[in-house]
Image (cartoon, rainbow, N blue to C red):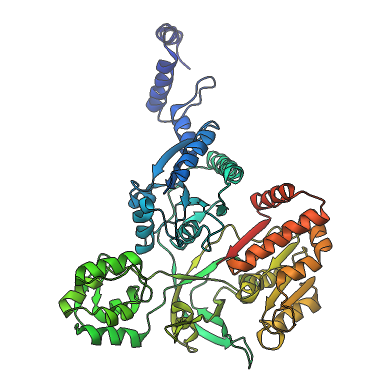
Amino acid sequence: MLSETKLNALKEISGSFSRDEAVWASGFLAGLAGSSVTVQDISSPTAHAEAVSAKKITLAYGTETGNSKKLAVELAGIIKKKGIQVKLADLSQYKPKDLLKEDFFFIIISTQGEGEPPILAKKFYDHLHENDPDLNSLKFGVLALGDSSYPLFCKTGEDVDSRLEVLGAQRIIPLKKCDVDYEQESHSWAEHILNVISKTADSNQKSTISPKASRGRKKYQGKVSSIINLNDIGSDKETYHIEIETEEALVYSPGDALGVMAFNPRTEVDEIISLTGIDAQKQIVTSKITASTEELLYKHLNISYLLKSTVAQYAQITGQNIPEVRLSLLDLLRIYPVKSAAEFEQVIGILTGQSPRLYSISSSLEAHGDTEIHITVAKSEFLISDKKQNGLCSGFLSAFNEGEDLEFYIQEAKHFRLPNQDKDIIMIGPGTGIAPFRSFLYERDAIGAEGRNWLFFGDRNFVSDFLYQAELQDFLKTGTLTHLDLAFSRDTAEKIYVQHRLKQKAQEVYHWLEGGASVYICGAKDPMSKDVEKTILNILQDKGKQTLEEAQAYLEELELSGRYVKDVY
């Protein structure tokens, strides 16, 4: 306590203080005391700064015709009225390196022509795909504008959304795709931002400040302990169940993905070296690594499907007139050869780094232990000029033998999470979309979850393409699976898909939704996930007696509450 003399002196001095002077004086006295104080009637500048910081976002736009900019300005105004600071950013001027400084980053971007980014946003788009920054601290959301009359509807938004996730950023609101009539859906997207930011800010204010987590990805070293082709004789597909064992304990949850960096085919690397005449062992310095030519081409650089911007740079280096196309490096060298090994060394300098591929984890720590992890990989095959080609990573993984080493990391997927143990779930996963649901089922079985589980699975043929058939039948027998509905499209005269099975069970699906069930969709984005969503909307209209607008609002509310979740590709 102060003596009466000092107290009177303090009262005399402070009596004429303005509010700002009183705030300063309280902080000054707290500093002298070496402790914090709380002034009941005066807001602390520090506390205010922390609150504002927790509610500061960047809203960026990439535009060709001006729609994205106009919408960004409008939505920024709406968000600001709710007390959230918004920094508007034009992607034509935005420095991609600043992504490392962002906490909340939301993008509105349109798609042009054949799935291309707006010209003014192309620099940002290319940088995002040509570099590999670690964005683990970034929280993001994407609003994609497009025209559904074009085949690659909203492709730029989809590309940016998936690329940010690959780089480690956390998607805190789902990708929203808007057609030419975007006003209502864009406003809903802004409301979603407000809800998420408010919850995050509240959480920040309740928690103590802690240092940022390490930005580096945790790398695991494993050995392939088992690799099995799940497709039977007669199938024209190859789907591999791959089990990997580690000595170090793993940390992951159902819904997470395994990330792996594929190596390029050795035969292609050898042919590139032969065509160019470059010394395979020559040490070359790149922006990220110094290694031999052979190692760079084999392990570190993308040579399989070059960006148009990379092809354009190749044309400048070689002085050749090359159309705006995407080719593999080998095909480019065959058609438009370099003049010398020295010229090819310049080409190496423009090649982008290899990007990791993500595969949904199909095992469970609770069921399989913390030194074993499983993935389900469909080998991708396609024709280019009548020559069969394999997808880079699926071809890489399917060629593994038991006992071979594999480095990988875990990509957390906070949006694709199981609900509480007593909640019901509906899982829709044809083909390799079954992967995370195998993880879900093993997890819920191991922990004795009370919630019911309903799986819709489909593929081409029952005999040759029923992935994990024995396991699913066992889950049915034990009651872990409440329902299993199957759709094999080529076993019937009229093709039957998972959305048709959903429609057949419309009344019960609606009953589960009304009872609080969560819906999960995994697999092909187009057309599967779109057809499934249309079917769910039809069920809501038919069985719920809702208008289309009411059904869309119902489904959106499920999405906002985490009860309608998609992992599609």
Q: Note whether 301 is above or below 64 in the view shown.
A: below
Q: Position of residue 306 (x, y in %)?
A: 35, 71
Residue 227, picture quadrant? bottom right
Residue 287: percent from left, percent from top: 25, 64
In the picture, measured across the screen, residue 547 lies left or right of residue 237, that is right
Q: Nearer the viewer, residue 344 or 513?
A: 344
417 with respect to 251 (left or right):
right
Provide residue 174's location: percent of width, then percent of height: 57, 54
Residue at image point 66% right, 61% down: 418
Q: Nearer the viewer, residue 507 or 394?
A: 507
Q: Picture coordinates of residue 372 (x, y %)? A: 56, 77
Q: Quadrant of the C terminus?
A: bottom right
Q: Residue at x 42, y 26 (%)?
A: 30
In the foreground, 203 or 294: 294
State whether residue 445 appears in this view: no
486 over 79 or under it: above or below: below
Q: Is residue 170 above or below residue 306?
A: above
Give the residue drawn at x 79%, y 49%: 546
Q: Is residue 446 left or right of residue 300?
A: right
Residue 29 visible in rendering = yes
- 512 left or right of 444? right
